[in-house]
Amino acid sequence: VIAIVATIATEVASFEPINEFGGEKYFAKHYEHRRDLGNTQPGDGVRFHGRGFIQLTGRANYRNYGQKLGLPLEDEPELALQPEVAAKLLASYFADRGIAEAARAGDWERVRRKVNGGLNGWDRFRSIVARLEQAAAAKEGVLVEGSLGPDVIALKKLLRTWGKEQPLPKPLKLTPLFGPATTAAVKAFQKANGIQATGKVGRKTWVALEAAAKTEVMH
């Protein structure tokens, strides 16, 4: 859900499906006769320009996704501007590219690359993801990058104790802010202990950290 919301907010700030920016001359220049997009007929560049939340582009994509969704997108490309259709297109696109898997792993750069092909809009995307993660984490009692408070200090103390035997990626200062260095340390601990390395600290990671810290103290 976070990946979908952040993607829409990055691509379309209004949260409404839109036409790709540019006019007919622009579309013709960039998309006409593009066989890689399935644009083989005169006027395809303009007719099948980008639309929706993710800018579905090219006759081949309109045909393929139309067949998947049971919609006449090739005959009526403007359907991609309908919110319900645009949402279905986005969900199908995410499923085709395994984006949910990257999101569950907390690999947001990979999520962005799978959607965008690069890192255009990265700063906005990452900022939105961080805010959404913080909101979700606060509701669930999970610590994530951006969290602030005494629990973060307690977390860092546990990580530093564990780090006496397992070198931490970066030094940790005992401040109440959960920053990038804390995320890196949490991921390192999770990897070393067979926990999915999300960088988020929920009950499973807390329990494992407390056990590891006790073991270290006993040594």
Image: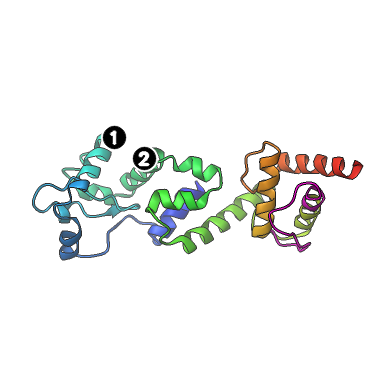
Classify 190 as above or below 26. above
Secondary structure type for disc 2 = helix
Give the mark nearer the N terminus: 1 vs 2: 1
Q: Residue shown at 34%/45% (left/top)?
A: 84
Asked whether the residues under the numbered discs 1 and 2 touch, taking CB atoms below 8 Å apart as contact, a structural biologist would say: yes
Residue type, mark 2 in image: Ser
- For the question of whether residue 20 can be seen, the reply is yes
Q: Residue shown at 38%/54% (left/top)?
A: 116
Measured from the top left, where is residue 9 in percent x and y? 43, 58
Secondary structure type for disc 1 = helix
Q: Which residue is mark 1?
A: 68
**In this orientation, which residue lies closer to the viewer: 157 or 92?**
157
Measured from the top left, where is residue 147 in percent x and y? 68, 58
Q: Residue shown at 91%/41% (left/top)?
A: 218
For label 1, the crowd category at 10 Å Cα-Cα, with few meaning under 14, some 14 to 19 and many 20 or more, is: few
Quarter of the C terminus within the rendering: top right
Q: Which mark is residue 188?
A: none
Q: Which residue is mark 2?
A: 92
Magenta stretch holds residue 174? yes
- For the question of whether residue 201 can be seen, the reply is no
What range of the chain is rendered magenta? 159-178
Q: Residue shown at 16%/43% (left/top)?
A: 75
**Most common secondary structure along the magenta stretch:** loop
Classify 170 as above or below 76. below
